[in-house]
Amino acid sequence: MHKPHRARRFASWLGIVAMALFAGCGGASDNLPRQAVSGEVKFDGAPLKSGLIQFQPAEAGAVTAGGTGIDNGSYSLPTSEGLVPGNYQVSVTTAGDTTTPLAPGGTPGDPVMKVKEPIPARYNATTELKAKVTKEGPNKFNFDLKSR
């Protein structure tokens, strides 16, 4: 695949994810037994500067998915936007600080920088991260991600 298309695809993907997250937020008026969820995300031992954490139901028939931004290693979903009790697959993404210039000879309209996902696929596209939200709580989930 031509490298400039990766940056466009990543930006489009982030936009779609953001729209889906906002559309999926039923809020306090949906009468679901939502629970607040929070925690910390580290990458190679340091707080993840910024990113996105998503919780997708791991069981058929589950009613909520959710996600929020990560800021200086912390994330929080308040009860009004929280998750119903159940098992979730968790994914973490970030654009990080790993942008590099494209090779000379690009065509007009190509982005100047390409975006590289520094977090391995085992934490997002093919996630192995899991969380179990309970009615009793506390629903605090910390994740220590490794680049290797």
Image (cartoon, rainbow, N blue to C red):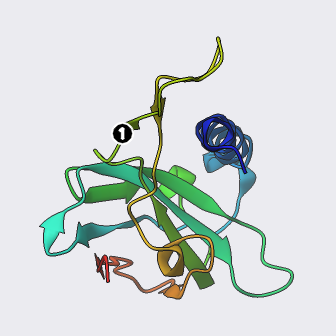
Residue sitting at 86 percent across and 80 percent down?
A: 61
**Residue 99 is drawn in which quadrant?**
top left
Using the rendered image of the protein, determine whether residue 22 is visible from the camera's viewpoint: yes
- Amino acid, disc 1: Thr
Residue 17 image offset from top left, x and y in percent: 66, 47
Q: How many marks?
A: 1
Q: Pointer 1: what residue?
A: 100
Residue 145 image offset from top left, x and y in percent: 31, 78
Q: Nearer the viewer, residue 94 or 33?
A: 94
Residue sitting at 51 percent across and 87 percent down?
A: 130
Residue 18 image offset from top left, x and y in percent: 62, 40
Q: Nearer the viewer, residue 94 or 35?
A: 94
* Classed neighbour count for the residue bearing mark 1: other residues with Cα under 10 Å, few (<14), some (14–19), many (≥20): few
Q: Nearer the viewer, residue 103 or 38?
A: 103
SS category of the residue bearing label 1: strand
Residue sitting at 58 percent across and 69 percent down?
A: 55
Residue 147 vertical placement versus 86 (above, below): above
Q: Nearer the viewer, residue 127 or 23?
A: 127
